Image: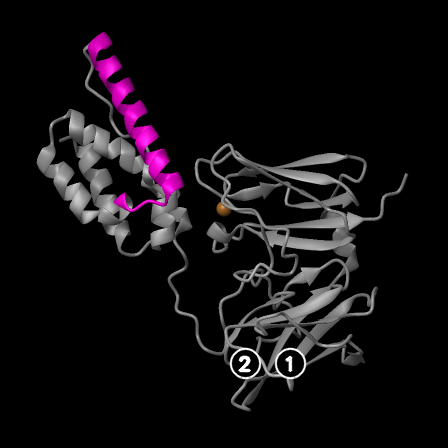
């Protein structure tokens, strides 16, 4: 057995324990197909059995991935035998590097109960301080320390436990209270949100909330964000395009900050060898714009969404939040 394939087996083995099962089954069926082919055609039956038993999880694919595995296996075997017969060359060597797939590994730091790791939190904003998370807080939109180019139409907070009616949200900008709309809950009552009056302008915003639960306990929390309209100058103006394409390349959205006209269809095209996502903020709830969410986009795959409402849409790739794979689309009224 060559050093190369031993090396790949070791990498698979090392990652089998700490990469989430979902990531393994999604990202590696084709790699598994190639490795199994390699071991079969080189008569490495012991290694093959070891591979199957040590990495048995890879064998329990969802149907879609099982089909991918079988197809890759058949194609690899056919190509390897054809090449071996035609050129008398050594058969197929797995040429897929796991290092690119390792990008899907989540950050290893443990979340603390009062300050969960967040997306869009790389930037330090003077005067905003740290967020205060109530127990059972999951995520919020806007994210703490996020900068937007306009005041959001709505703020929302997700929890992992049902909320009671006594819960509250209050909002202030630069120390002045903003009167939000009525507090709304989703059907499962794990999400509460409130609308803001439009065009509140630049400044530091604090969203203070009281999360109350069925056992009559309540806890207070706070998130902060910034609105800075001048930031819009960094955005690429594509308001005269009817259809816009964003490449998913090198674990980035390219371009990642654009302005489009209402009614524009944006298509994301995956040019990377790993799968990506286009998910509405916040992560992991993805519910600022629930319909604006892709399934996994495989290499060469696409996802399209038509923006029928004006506003600022922040999104991210669920597989690459630690790599800061974020984007923003501003949707404006169509100017003829
Ligand atoms: Cu991604």
Residue in the image at 36% along x and 34% along y? 68
Find the distance from the CA under tag 1 to the CA under tag 2.
9 Å
**Badge 2 is on which residue?**
134
Q: What is the secondary structure assignment of the residue under circle 1? A: strand
Q: Which mark is residue 260?
A: none
Q: Kindly tell me whether residue 95 is visible in this rendering.
A: no
Q: Nearer the viewer, residue 87 or 158?
A: 158
Residue 84 vertical position relative to residue 110 in the rendered view, above or below: above
Q: Secondary structure at mark 2?
A: loop
Quarter of the rendering containing residue 156: bottom right
Q: Which residues are magenta?
A: 59-87
Answer with the quarter of the image where residue 41 lies.
Answer: top left
Residue ID for mark 1: 209
Q: Position of residue 85 (x, y in %)?
A: 20, 10
Question: Dot 2, crowdedness within 10 Å: few (<14), some or many (≥20)?
Answer: many
- Return the x and y of residue 66 as percentages of the image width and height: 33, 39
Main SS class of the magenta portion in the image: helix
Which of these two is toward me, 316 or 226? 316
Residue in the picture at 17% in, 29% down:
40
The disc, 1 or 2, on the residue closer to the chain's N-terminal end is 2
Name of the residue lying farthest toward the top:
86
Q: Position of residue 333 (x, y in %)?
A: 84, 48
Q: Is residue 264 left or right of residue 128?
A: right
Q: Position of residue 137 (x, y in %)?
A: 53, 75
**Left or right: where 156 falls relative to 1:** right
């Amino acid at each position: 057995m060559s050093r190369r394939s031993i090396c790949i087996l070791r990498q698979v083995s090392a990652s089998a324990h700490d990469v989430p099962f979902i990531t393994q089954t999604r990202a590696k069926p084709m790699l598994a197909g190639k490795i199994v082919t390699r071991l079969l055609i080189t008569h490495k039956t012991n290694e093959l059995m070891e591979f199957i038993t040590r990495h048995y999880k890879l064998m329990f694919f969802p149907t879609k991935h099982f089909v991918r595995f079988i197809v890759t296996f058949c194609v690899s075997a056919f190509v390897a035998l054809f090449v071996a017969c035609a050129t008398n060359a050594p058969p197929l060597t797995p040429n897929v590097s796991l290092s690119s797939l390792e990008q899907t590994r989540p950050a290893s730091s443990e979340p603390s109960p009062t300050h969960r790791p967040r997306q869009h939190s790389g930037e330090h904003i003077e005067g905003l301080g740290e967020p205060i998370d109530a127990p059972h807080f999951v995520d919020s939109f806007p994210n703490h320390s996020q900068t937007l180019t306009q005041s959001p139409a709505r703020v929302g907070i997700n929890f992992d436990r049902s909320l009671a009616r006594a819960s509250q949200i209050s909002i202030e900008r630069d120390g002045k209270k903003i009167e939000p709309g009525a507090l709304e809950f989703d059907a499962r009552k794990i999400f509460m949100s409130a609308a803001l009056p439009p065009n509140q302008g630049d400044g530091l915003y604090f969203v203070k909330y009281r999360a109350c639960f069925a056992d009559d306990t309540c806890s207070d929390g706070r998130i902060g964000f910034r609105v800075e309209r001048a930031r819009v100058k960094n955005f690429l103006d594509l308001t005269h395009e009817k259809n816009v394409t964003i490449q998913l390349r090198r674990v980035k959205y390219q371009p990642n900050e654009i302005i489009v006209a209402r009614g524009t269809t944006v298509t994301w095209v995956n040019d990377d060898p790993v799968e990506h996502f286009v998910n509405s903020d916040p992560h992991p709830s993805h519910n600022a714009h629930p319909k604006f969410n892709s399934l996994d986009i495989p290499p060469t795959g696409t996802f399209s969404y038509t923006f029928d409402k004006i506003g600022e849409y922040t999104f991210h790739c669920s597989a690459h939040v630690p790599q800061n794979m974020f984007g923003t689309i501003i949707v404006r009224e169509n100017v003829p």
